[in-house]
Each structure stands twice: as structure tokens, then as C-alpha cells.
Image (cartoon, rainbow, N blue to C red):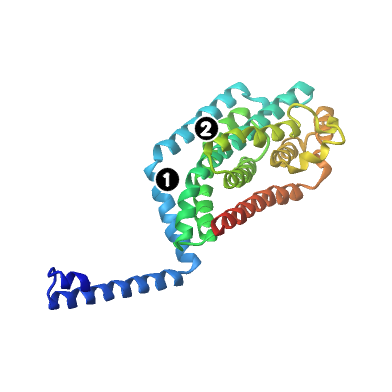
Amino acid sequence: MKELETAGFLDKNETKNAHHQLISTKSSSSVAMTSMERVDIATQTHLLFDREMKKLFRDKFSFVVRVVSNLIFGLLFGLIFKDVGRSDYVAYPEVMASFGAQSNLLISTMFGVAQSSLMEFPKDRPVFLREYSTNHYSVIPYFLSKFTVECFTVLIQVLSQLIAAFFLMGFRTNFFAFMALNFALAMASTSIGIFIGSCVQDPSVAAELMPALIVPQLLFSGFFIQTNLIPDFLVWAQYLCSLVYATRLANSYEFGDCDTESCRSLLENNEVYQLEQYWYWIILLGIAAVFRIAATVILRGKASF
């Protein structure tokens, strides 16, 4: 300021006004910073939620594509496995057909949401790290806002797939119980996808890790091989797979009241009654919580570093 006055660019009055404006700007910035620091978690979460919703509607085409794809897949599954749940389950192939229909729906639910979260999170991470480093918000409101929006989008995706498939297949299971089961599995898969996405920087690396997320779930769920035939030195791995617990819950809902030898054989071979139903729910929701908390810790550590 002094140099400009000396060089003749400003007179004394202009210098004085400019000085006052500079002080006013600094004061405003200080007040803004102080106000920002005083913003509570609820306000941060609300503002971030608004931003996530705007982001969702701005890119609504991709969301609509996912929903329409789920509708098509659900209709396709329903037509292929039409009326499998309306059989008397006396013959073992009838039971296996219904088991295959359930498994395909659960796998489709798991794969669809896990893929989107695994691919999208590494893209959002640089924005988060930049804004977190400048004290725009903390980690917890960021994850809470994303979690809230995910609950909405995942529920729509799950419902769009089941709305046709479930009634075409004719399952004996209560629709809302099966929908809740698919939703819980989807949220667990989303949490695992976010956890892996928080560990890597490049979306292409995240894509390479997709088989590591999906293949073990398929191998230990009982879809390809009965769980009682898995070698003893590998059997422990099934307890890390969310699909295992979802499959056992689905089997217990569908075949639990069935008195035929075929139903009893399926339930025993896949060790469905190894635990009570409520334990499967607790573990399934626990997986969702643990991996999401782990992702929060990892992201906070990387942001602080």
C-alpha cells in the first residue's frame, strides 16, 4: 500500500480507504473462519447431505440407468425362475431351483451396489481430502451424509429388482422380510466397497480389486459347493463373507417351515441352523458397521497425514 502511494497511484484518502477495506476483509475472513469452526456436526451433515442430493440429481441419468437395469434383471430372473417357490419342495431339484433363484437375487444385489461404491469413492476422495485439509468439515459428517443418501439410492435399487422377480418366482418368504434382507446385504456390500475404495487412490486399481470382493462371497455361500464340504482349513473364511449370512437367512425363511426331506437336507448341508436367525442379522449389520467405521478411520488418517 505504501509503495503505491509513493509511486503516485493512490493519494492519501484513497490509501486510507483501501487500508480500511483491507482490515474489514481480514475481519470478515476471521469471523467466517470462527463461524465455520463453530458449526456443529448436525449442520455440517445437513449441508453435506444437500450437496450429495444435488450431486445425485445432477447426475440422475446414471442413477436411472442403474434402476432400469435392476428392473430388467429382476424381470429376467423372475421369468427364468417363474413359480419355483410355488412347488411342494418334495423333489430335491425343486428345492435347488428355489435356492438358485434366491442366490441369484442376492448375488445381483451384492454385486450391483458394491461395484458402484467401489468405483465412485476413489473419484470423490481427492475432493474430500482437499476440503478436509482446509477445515471445511470433519470426517463423520461427510460419511453420515453419504450414508443417508446411500440408504435412499440402495433402497430404490433393491426395490426395483425385487418388485417383479419376487412375485414371479412365488417365494413363500414374506416380501418385506426378503426386501429387508436384500437391503441389509446391499448396505454391507456398500460398506466393504467404500472400505476398499478408501484404501486406494486410482479407480482402475479399485476395479482390479473387484474379484477379491466378489469371488470369495460366491465360493463360500453354498451356491457352488455345499458349505459342509468346504475343507476344514478354509472353512473359517466363510465367516467373513456377508453373502453367507444373507443366504442362510433367506434359506431359513423359505425352507424353515418345510417338512420334506429335500428341505431338511438343504438346510443341514448349508449349515443354516448353525446360529439363530437374530445372530445372522446382528453379524450382517455388524459387517456393514465395522467396514464403514474402518473406512472412516483410514480416510481420517490419510487426511491428517
Q: Crowding near pointer 1: few (<14 within 10 Å), some, many (20+)? A: some
Image coordinates for residue 218, horizontal then vertical, percent: 70, 32
Q: Which amino acid, by three-letter code, is at mark 1?
A: Leu
Residue 7 sits in which quadrant?
bottom left
Image coordinates for residue 57, horizontal then vertical, percent: 39, 45
Viewport quadrant of the N terminus:
bottom left
Image coordinates for residue 305, horizontal then vertical, percent: 57, 57
Question: In the displayed structure, does residue 129 sit left or right of residue 32?
Answer: right
Q: Crowding near pointer 2: few (<14 within 10 Å), some, many (20+)? A: many
Q: Which amino acid, by three-letter code, is at mark 2?
A: Asn
Foreground: 135 or 20? 20
Q: Nearer the viewer, mark 1 or mark 2?
A: 1
Residue in the picture at 18% in, 78% down: 16
Query: Is 62 placed above or below 75 here?
Result: below
Image coordinates for residue 46, horizontal then vertical, percent: 45, 60
Q: In what element is the residue under mark 2?
A: helix
Question: In the displayed structure, does residue 43 sit left or right of residue 3?
Answer: right
Whichever of callouts 1 and 2 sits on the residue coming sooner in the sequence is: 1
Foreground: 44 or 270? 44
Q: In what element is the residue under mark 1?
A: helix
Residue in the picture at 74% in, 23% down: 94
Q: Return the residue at label 2.
A: 70
Residue 212 sits in which quadrant?
top right
Disc ID at residue 56:
1
Residue in the picture at 45% in, 70% down: 37
Question: In the displayed structure, does residue 35 sit left or right of residue 95?
Answer: left
